[in-house]
Image (tube, helix red, strand yellow):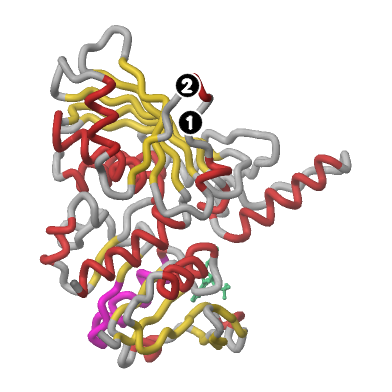
Amino acid sequence: ENLNVAIVGATGAVGTKILEKLLERKFPANSIKLLASKRSAGLEISAGGQTYIVEETVPESFEGVDIAFFSAGGSISQKFAHEAVKRGTVVIDNTSAFRMDENIPLVVPEVNPQTLEQHSGIIANPNCSTIQMVAALQPIKEKFGIKRIIVSTYQAVSGAGAEAIDELDQQSTQFSERAHIKAELLPSASAERHYPIAFNAIPQIDLFDESGYTLEELKMMNETKKIFGDQEMAVTATCVRLPVVTGHSESVYIETGDENATVADIRAAMENAPGVVVQDDPSAQLYPMPLFAEGKDEVFVGRIRKDPKHPGGFHMWIVSDNLLKGAALNSVQIAEELIK
Ligand code: A2P
């Protein structure tokens, strides 16, 4: 109770939502310190009837801070997370910096809250696409087991940060004005080439590995096995960026461990899962869409079908707000679980 909280990357797409969720969920914070780069120092942010002044992130920022949420990119986490831990702060890190570190729990509270007990200062928040998938699949794994997952994603630009939203916005105007489309950021700031995202689909999120997979795909594959605690599970991903502002969609194929499982069984398991909402009625054209998932806390599932050939195989469509359950909400839920 009465915790001193900090948000690193408070001016960013996710940082802004973390502040919103802390206030909305009445997190027992005594103080909330907003940290960003030097560029933003002095900036005023109003939320919940209060005005906060953004400060530059320096090692001393963490003196007296109990919990710090990091969402300013992997290099900032690498630079400051240990400085924070040294000062007694518990870090909940939204970047990929520590996720695959054996000694750092990678947590989705509905799936593996027990792993929180072993933390030694840093807790990793999984990749946005991973979180919504494992949250939706957890009840199926529990009841029937899951042997294989093949996922293709349809990811929103906000997952690449506030600047990517601006890029889509500007390119949309350039497109409608028949002007030259300027691409400077996506698919990845550090990539050699940039392609327009407006009216396009880019099958590259983050950089390529020598395996031919992108780092985003490898994150989904590796993180899913770590969170489920099952290194034998076969998981493969294809990650695609779409001109959607917020809300990631996923076409997911699973092979369960039960050849007799029915669509009704799968649906019932998911309907009873915390944070999961089944929206699945083809006769009423009811299925999840990112436009309607934006701003919502839940993970939405629809289009649940049996594979025509593979007994125990199912296809489905999973959608969630990538900035909320995919990032800010999950981070705040981790903090809530910690102080329980
Ligand atoms: P700033 O606005 O001062 O650049 P997004 O994910 O939307 O791209 O946001 C990235 C966040 O990371 C922003 O809040 C940004 O702050 C922050 N950030 C970028 N560079 C640094 C840095 N060197 N130190 C602290 N925060 C940083």
Classify 257 as above or below 124.
Answer: above
The Cα atoms of the two marked residues, 1 and 2, are separated by 7 Å
Q: Quadrant of residue 260?
A: top left
Magenta stretch prevailing secondary structure: helix
**Marked residue nearer the N-terminal end (1 or 2):** 2
Residue 226 % position (x, y) = 20, 47
Q: Are marks 1 and 2 in contact (CB under 8 Å)?
A: yes
Magenta-drawn stretch contains 24: no
Furthest residue in direction top, as rendered: 309
Give the left or right position of residue 328, taking residue 165 as reference: left
Q: Quadrant of residue 21?
A: bottom left
Q: Which residue is mark 2?
A: 282
Relative to the observer, which residue lies in front, 209 or 143? Answer: 143
Q: Which residues are magenta?
A: 75-91
Q: Residue at x 56, y 83 (%)?
A: 49
Q: Quadrant of the N terminus?
A: bottom left
Q: Residue at x 29, y 73 (%)?
A: 91
Q: Indicate the amino acid at tag 2.
A: Pro
Residue 231 % position (x, y) = 15, 39
Relative to the observer, which residue lies in front, 164 or 137? Answer: 137
Q: Which mark is residue 287?
A: 1
Relative to the observer, which residue lies in front, 206 or 335? Answer: 335
